[in-house]
Image (cartoon, rainbow, N blue to C red):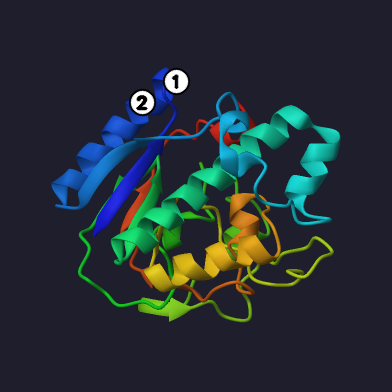
């Protein structure tokens, strides 16, 4: 599986975790490289910054109105994914997006999936991940192998727009996406606009599946860089 680990250039702890991540994936023979991420300091210079509409009543729209620095951080995260989806389409093969705190615990066995595959299933509702709080921490993903999200899955898009009540992904720390899935997301943001990355990656836009046992877990320290820290 081809994959990239996104890190923050100039951020000592991010670079340190990215190196730890890279070594863990190399141990399991992933075709992987480090990718310098877009940040709040660089995002406004990109043509994509003003290319996409912000979905009305979205979380990103709220940040733009109420906390512009947080908005810049969140749109930076979103555009990192947009650039990645374009790479996947150009490559014509599934690829994995990994954040700097991803630690590999198993190899990729060419398991087929449709659009989007959560790779860190068993860890997304546990500390140090921010979703490791009640009521989410009581949810367990059923089954083994590749499965679709069930009716009890707790993360629903709650903003009042076209995506309301869709299943959202549990963060974007470790996922794989097919060219078909990447095309669906690029079409969706062109048609509807963009939101915070884990909000716009929802079941209205593409088919979300997960793999269990997980192939990836989190580093023991959450740097909270998506919060601008």
Q: Position of residue 6 (x, y in %)?
A: 40, 39
Mark 1: give few (<14), some (14-19) or many (20+) Cα within 10 Å. Answer: few
Between 134 and 45, the residue placed more toward the observer is: 45
User: At x 47% / y 77%, what residue is drawn?
Assistant: 142
Residue 155 seen anywhere in this rendered image of the structure? no
Q: Which residue is mark 1?
A: 11
Between 216 and 14, the residue placed more toward the observer is: 14
Secondary structure of the residue carrying numbered label 2: helix
Residue 130 seen anywhere in this rendered image of the structure? yes
Q: Which image quarter: residue 113? A: bottom left
Secondary structure of the residue carrying numbered label 1: loop
User: At x 33% / y 25%, what residue is drawn?
Assistant: 16
Real-space Cα separation, disc 1 to disc 2, in angstroms? 6 Å
On screen, residue 71 above or below 177: above
Q: Which mark is residue 15?
A: 2
Mark 2: give few (<14), some (14-19) or many (20+) Cα within 10 Å. Answer: some
């Amino acid at each position: 599986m081809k994959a990239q680990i996104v890190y923050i250039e100039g951020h000592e702890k991010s670079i340190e975790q990215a190196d730890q991540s890279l070594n863990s994936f190399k141990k399991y023979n992933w075709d992987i490289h480090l990718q310098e991420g877009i940040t709040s300091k660089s995002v406004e210079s990109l043509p994509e910054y003003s290319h996409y509409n912000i979905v009305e009543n979205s979380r990103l729209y709220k940040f733009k109105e109420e906390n512009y620095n947080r908005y810049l951080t969140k749109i930076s995260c979103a555009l990192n994914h947009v650039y990645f989806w374009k790479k996947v389409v150009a490559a014509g093969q599934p690829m994995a997006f990994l954040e700097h705190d991803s630690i590999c615990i198993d190899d990729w066995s060419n398991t087929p999936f449709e659009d989007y595959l959560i790779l860190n299933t068993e860890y997304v509702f546990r500390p140090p991940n921010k979703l490791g709080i009640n009521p989410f921490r009581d949810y367990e993903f059923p089954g083994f192998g590749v499965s679709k999200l069930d009716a009890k899955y707790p993360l629903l898009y709650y903003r009042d727009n076209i995506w309301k009540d869709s299943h959202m992904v549990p963060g974007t720390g470790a996922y794989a996406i097919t060219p078909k899935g990447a095309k669906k997301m690029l079409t969706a943001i062109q048609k509807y606009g963009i939101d915070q990355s884990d909000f716009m990656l929802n079941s209205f836009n593409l088919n979300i599946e997960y793999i269990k046992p997980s192939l990836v877990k989190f580093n023991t320290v959450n740097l909270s860089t998506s919060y601008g820290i």
